[in-house]
Amino acid sequence: SPNGGVSPLEPRALKWPLLDASAKAWLDDPGRMALLASTARPDEIDPAEYDAIYFTGGHAVMWDFPDSEGLQRITRAIWEHGGIVSSVCHGYCGLLNTKLSDGTLLVAGKRITGFSRLEEVLAGVARRMPYNAEAEMKRRGARYDKALLPFVSHVVVDDRLVTGQNPGSAKATAEKVAVLL
């Protein structure tokens, strides 16, 4: 969480079809849930201690992630030291404004995916979103890619940048990151 403390859960993720056996196991494990109850602030994180960053999804991150200088600092450091930068669903909003040390945007020229505008429309939430994330990625020079059909798992790997399109892509995205690690 950009502010540390409690990391809220996306309410839609707590329902079928996203609430699978793996998600239920997390929810039923007090030790794991305690990890989400007390997260560190970005300024408390030393990126040199990490080989990857994984931006989670959920609609709230469209507001929380893009302008977080702390998250941008961590992302830049991990990327520039050869680490993996990854996101799933709306998590790619955390990459919108991340600049590298040379001033270029991390996403410029990179193949990337994330929750599509069509998926926003079909989910019935497009009008409530603060911006069109897909269009904003393209505007920043990212080579946005999406699955032919909405809501199916789709992962894009461009060097050390690993992105998943939607909640159904979370497992496959994490697996790709694990392979790269």
Image: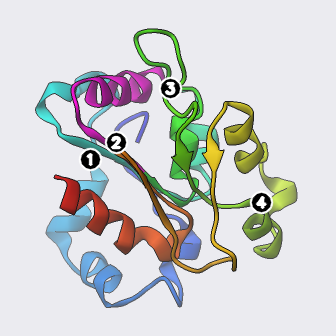
**Which corner quadrant holds the N terminus?**
top left
x and y percentages locating residue 39 in the rendered image: 28, 44
In the image, is residue 28 above or below residue 118? Answer: below
x and y percentages locating residue 13 in the rendered image: 51, 74
Asked if the residues shown at circle 1 and circle 2 are in contact, with their CB atoms under 8 angstroms apart, the answer is yes
Label 2 and label 3: CA atoms lie apart by 23 Å
Query: Could you say whether the residue bearing mark 1 is in a helix, strand or loop?
Result: loop
Q: How many marks?
A: 4
Label 1 and label 4: CA atoms lie apart by 33 Å
Residue 117, labelled with which disc?
4
Disc 1: which residue: 38
Question: In screen coordinates, is 47 left or right of 3?
Answer: left
Residue 5, labelled with which disc?
2
Mark 2 closeness class: few <14, some 14–19, many ≥20 residues within 10 Å: some
Mark 2 vs mark 3: in front: 3
Residue 124, labelled with which disc?
none
For the question of whether residue 59 can be seen, the reply is yes
Disc with the residue nearer the chain's start (2 vs 4): 2
What segment is highlighted magenta in the picture?
68-86
Q: Main secondary structure of the magenta part?
A: helix
Asked if the residues shown at circle 2 and circle 3 are in contact, with their CB atoms under 8 angstroms apart, the answer is no
Query: Could you say whether the residue bearing mark 3 is in a helix, strand or loop?
Result: loop
Residue at the spot x=30%, y=56% of the render?
36
Disc 3: which residue: 98
x and y percentages locating residue 173 in the rendered image: 38, 64
Asked if the residues shown at circle 3 and circle 4 are in contact, with their CB atoms under 8 angstroms apart, the answer is no
Mark 3 vs mark 1: in front: 3
x and y percentages locating residue 107 in the rendered image: 54, 34
Disc with the residue nearer the chain's start (1 vs 2): 2
